[in-house]
Amino acid sequence: MREQPMMFIKEFGQIDINSIQEVGGKGASLGEMTRAGLPVPPGYCITAGAYRQFVSRAGLAELLAQFAEPSTMKNEDIALLAQEISQRILETPLPEELEQEIVQAFTQIIGHGSLAAVRSSATAEDLPEASFAGQQESYLNIPRSELLNHIKQCWASLWTERAIHYRINNGFDHRQVYLAVVVQQMVDSEVSGVAFSVNPMNAKENEMVIESVWGLGEGIVSGKVTPDHYVINKQNDPLIRYVIADKEKMAVRPLHGSGTLFAEVAEAQRQRSSLSQKDILELTELIKRIEEHYQLPQDIEWAKTGNRYYILQARPITTLDKAPVQVDESIGESEFFNFDPELEWTNLGGVKERYNKPSSVLGWSILEPCDTEGGLYAYRSISKKELPSPLFAANIYGYLYLNFTSLKSLQSLKMLEPYAAVPDWQQFAPKRTWFQELTLTIGSIKAGNKLIKSLAKDFYAMLPGYLDKIDKYKKTDVTGLTTPELLDYIKNNLELAKQFFQLQLPSLSVTEALYNMLTGFMKKWLGDKDLTLSSKLVSGLPDNLTVRTNNKLWVLTETVASSPYLRELLAQSTIPEFLNRLADSAEGKAFQAQLTDFLGDYGHLNVNMDIAEDFWWENPGIVLAMVKGSLTADKRINPEEREQQKQQEREETEVLVRSKLNFVQREIFAKLLKSTQSYMLLRDNRHFYVTMPFSLIKKAVVTLGERLTAQGYLLDPRDIYYLTLAEIEGLLSHQLAWSQGYEKINRRKSAPRVALDDLPSLFKGWPKLSGDAATARKTAYVPSANSGQESALQGVAGSPGQVRGQVKIICSPADFSRFQAGDILVAENTDPAWTPLFSIASAVVTEHGGLLSHGAIVAREYGIPAVLGVKNATKIFRDGQTITVDGKKGAVYPES
């Protein structure tokens, strides 16, 4: 407590944003943030009243009066007058009472032996209409002995030629602009920088930019050091992209005297990120707090020392409306979303099998939060540790990758064995002591047992409410919604999808673990080396929705087969012609009603979980193509009869296995089999449910794309798939200029496609393209079945049996109509939407997948051989080529 209040000094805690006329924009902002509880270094302001008194005592009124009509003054006259005013300020001593207050405040607030930053704060500075930032001076590392001199230098900086011309150009009256001075305790920062709560390059409100350097912020302000650059999504805090600069120098406090000097940065630090992931997250939260407090985008200067962040100043960003059209930076030729080269990334563990085609940009922006939700749920179900990184899923050239750095922290070395086949595995393998490994293994077993008991139960408990909401949203006529309502509809369904994914991803892991335990048991105690018995034990399970879908498709096929008119019409017409002509006959109308009912129940299915791909409801040709293919079979087996046979076979196999086990083994087998069958069924059924909200999102996106095209915003309705959901929101809210939207669309359309097999399965840093797929296409290596086993193309044995037949390469549902009964299906991968092809295929070969892939499961269900994971199969083989598929040995023998 002071005995007398100071006339010309205001501590930060005594002022707020309404004090601009008294302490200037910079001072008012520091006071406002101090009172809001933000981490501002202590300090005080020398008020504009002190400046006015000093100007009066120095006899400057006469000189300032000459600026009454500045527009009539010549440049040389302004230069001479500016020099004279500045000289008068510097030569005139401070009034004694003012000097005493300034020094006393320094001692009490800053500290006698401490250093301060002395900054100008103009009373018109940082108003929304114009920015005076940089027009007046600031001084760093000022001791008390030099304080008074630097205060006068701040006052004098108001009258430099540059400052005078700036005010003239922006229409400010020189006689009504006063200068306060901020004296703030100096932060000897290890890292410092600037931040923009809205991306100033594109005015996107959901992005913020942080720039940082080693040492003091003078490195950035002076432009002598290129900062590290980070762009962050404010909505969920992922790092969108960053560029790490080569920071050769850093601003530091001199050993003697005031100011700053530039020192060389140690070689090891120059190209190292000046901020860690944790730093970025903490800064992001702090910046969001400041923006939320002011309710305006903010330009912020910050510093870090130890583990504390300090805000040195904040001012409104006044140039967003004037921002030039800029493009987002791209990394290489394509954009990588959510990618951090400091982390390890993988597409193994079923990812490559499921997401084997590049996703659309919009599809990715909808799928990513779902995968992240599932990943975080799985992580927290197993571990109480903090997630190593907030990034869980990344988009690399359009393909999904998962954060292996986080995944491996949860898994024992035994669970990581599927990854051990990648090149240079040792550089990725976790480094643990035997005790750490034992602890993790025990913890994983406990967590796994807990999940086995709860996941299926939780899933089926959640399902009724999930389906109720789906039914509610399904009844909405999206064409009648306004554009904001369409966006809300999309986001509501996205939240529903995220809820489903919480249980989906962990259930996949549990299924794989259980099946591996079952096959391990069968190999050890039953000698089931080729998994023939194991396959039968998980086939023919009741209530399989994939099988049910195929059964209903078979009914459609039989309707066409029983009608010579419909059969001829389908054979001789294109799909659109067939659909148009159904109304011409009673048989056609009856089939059309049957098809409509089928699409009502199963139309939500699609391929690859990408909403840019057709769903059955929007392209009935996918269904009719499968009907057309099924008609080529000489004998069509009723799938319900086949399913009954598979169920009987499963039951007989269970009896056989039990008969060969002792009492203890039977007990273990019974529990293991029950859990495995339950989760195998759940795994297959989840695709039927998971696509439901995506299908509804697609209906809204189609409506929105057509609407924006009709309004002239898009050239093609499908252009909408080249924008993220956040970008679409930005365009519709005018936070993102349409010119920028067009630039993104055009750039992304022209980005080169990269083959999945050209990408590494596990990597850290920037992914290197291998070109293996290109090599395979060029060499077209075709081994002969007569040249011995060495010539076989090796893969994963997915379903036993041996078949010799002709290849039919199917790349997408558009090719379904080409597939005929008896063909060997060769594809990159399959999913439940492809299941009807299995009913007429003689064998299956895929480029991706394993024992629990869709192709393996359904091939076992239909009793046909399957070999998965045959690299570049769709490039090496050709339509009509004869090959032999050995599903027991996991080999494919091509014939020339």
Image (spheres, helix red, strand yellow):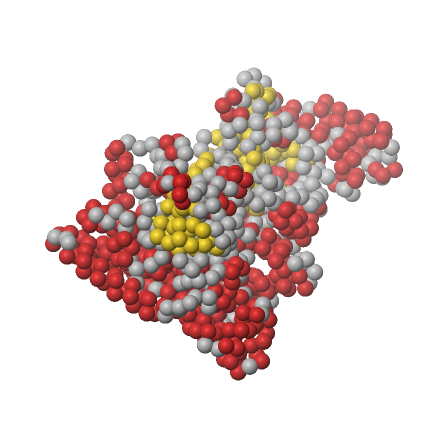
Q: Quadrant of residue 120?
A: top right
Residue visible at 61% across and 38% down in the picture: 27
Residue at 82 percent across and 27 percent down: it is: 80
Q: Is residue 554 visible?
A: yes
767 or 402: nearer the eye?
767
Report the front residue among 744 and 857. Answer: 857
Quarter-of-image position of residue 175 = top right
Q: 507 or 750: nearer the eye?
A: 750
- Which is nearer the eye, 686 or 194? 686
Q: Give residue 479's position: percent from left, percent from top.
A: 58, 69
Instruction: Give me the residue at 74% from left, 34% from top.
Output: 163
Relative to residue 95, is residue 420 drawn left or right? Answer: left
Q: Is residue 512 above or below residue 695?
A: above
Residue that lies at the very extreme toward the top in this rendered image: 256
Q: Is residue 723 above or below residue 346?
A: below
Instruction: Give residue 149's position: percent from left, percent from top.
Output: 65, 24
